[in-house]
Image (cartoon, helix red, strand yellow):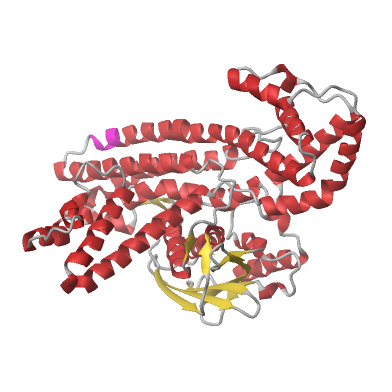
Amino acid sequence: MLEKASQGQELSLVEISILKDILIEDNLSLVGRFSCSDDLINERLNICQTLLKIDPANSELYLEEIKEISLQIAMNIGMQKVDQNRVYVDFHGIKRWAEKEHRESFNRWVELSEIDTAPVPSSRMIFNKMYENADVIPEELLVKPATQADQLFLEILRSTLNKFLNDPKDGLNSYLSLRVRHGSLEGFLRSPFAEEGLLTEFDQEKSKHVLTEQMVKSLPYHCTSTISDLESILGRFTSTLNESLEAFVKKKLRIKSEAYPDGLIEVHVSSAMFNIIKLDTLSNVSFEKFLETIFSQFVIWTDYSLKAVRDDIALQIGSTIETAIENLRNDFGGLSDKEQLHFIRDRINRGYLAFQKALEKAADWFQFQPMEDYSRVFSIDEVMKIAIQMTKNVCPGFEPDIDLQIEGDFPLLHSLTLNIINDVLVIVLGNVHKHANVESNSKVYILIQNDEKERLLRVTVKNKVSSNIVYGANIQKIEDIKKIIEKGDHINILPTEGGSGLIKLSRLIPSDHGPIDKYLSFGFDDENNFVVSVAMPFRIIQTGEGTANANISC
């Protein structure tokens, strides 16, 4: 029918009705020819655009659906951008540091290299060897640093690699802490089971695992007598899942070091890395080219190391939960009530299938996307909806009633800005979910403002907290966090996890800041609300077509 319409042939009322009411997304999903949900959404968009042309009487209906589909496409792209940048290094920050720290040393190395009499192999010859036999490293790349120039070059590389991996603000470990370890990975992988009610909550007063309110309400009406059995069985499964994820995040998802001997990410300046960078730099002696070369090599070697993370997620976590699911099925296999058995089995099957998909998706997080992509821009409304949905994805059961207000006109925002706003909301809304001690669907107010005079994008979040949260000890904790930030002691704490995560927001304070509360403030108000306000400097980027877009520049 679409082909017929595209050729200008008139469609019958029945054919139009089929396109309009039958070939909707739910029904299209039953057709086997769509390889992924994106293809399905694009097909429905194509149908609506065709209907808009051939059925003008219902144009308002089609325009509204096209608007909804376009938002969904933007959200899908945006959520993919967020996931692609969970493994991240702020190359601009590392470059600024290297300019101050190593430009002079680099110039000294250039001088020493010019008087170095050691023969330098042809880089073209070496790369030809690698092309001819990729399984064998050419012997020229295995030569160890020997001269004074080599030793100086090695010191520069090691120092910069350490900064790349471990800088508390700009390095890989810091962003892993912010975007993965601080609850995101665990929450994302718990969500499939939580949505099916298969995870228990630990009741401190009763000192035992209890079913969630959602699960209790959904049980077949005559199953209440077996709740204690369900709590015991699902409690064991919940403990196994939590312990497996916690062990991976705390011990393995680390840069390997004396403090973290089980860390899976291990990168050193090997002879091969050293010689590749040296040969490439000697062929074009400039500090800027040198930085480009070392960053690209660091990414290649780190990406190779990240394969161990992907494998561990797929194999170790995957096999542990597979065994736990088998045990869960066996534990429930003895239920005499067939309706209850069917109810539980359906939830286990759905939850485990969704978990396997989530596990595969989480493994894909651990790949470098080093180039900042300015080709895709988002409206502020799209950015906020993406960030809110991403927060829900890592906070199982969190369905707040969001009151979103946007003040001022905003330029289109690049994916870098999307990622930073997402970082803010995951921390702030995650705190509402974990620490406010209120209903999961409670009201949350979010205000977005464009301060054009100061060129600041300000995000303010206000939520009600339980009255028993606002007491002396918690108020003092908030004041202690503020003092740490004011003293400048927060930088070295950025790569750590636990607690509220509010200190992580301090990474957005510019290095040349004035009063800190101009950029970051948080605390309780007089009406038992917790209020967080974050202001982020942004800069305007002119595209080739003269369009003004924006990026956060802190």
Q: Is residue 188 left or right of residue 255?
A: left
Please tell me in which quadrant of the rendered image residue 482 appears. Answer: bottom right
Q: Which residues are magenta?
A: 329-333
Q: Is residue 16 above or below residue 185?
A: below
Image coordinates for residue 385, horizontal then vertical, percent: 42, 65
Image coordinates for residue 61, horizontal then vertical, percent: 22, 71
Image coordinates for residue 5, horizontal then vertical, percent: 17, 57
In this view, the residue in front, 357 or 64, is 64
Q: Is residue 349 above or below residue 487?
A: above
In this view, the residue in front, 49 or 379, is 49
In this view, the residue in front, 51 or 264, is 51
**Residue occupying image coordinates x 47% and y 77%:** 406
Image coordinates for residue 532, horizontal then vertical, percent: 57, 71
Residue 144 painted magenta: no
**Residue occupying image coordinates x 51% and y 48%:** 84
Q: Is residue 203 visible?
A: no
Kindly give the residue lying farthest to the right in the view shown: 115
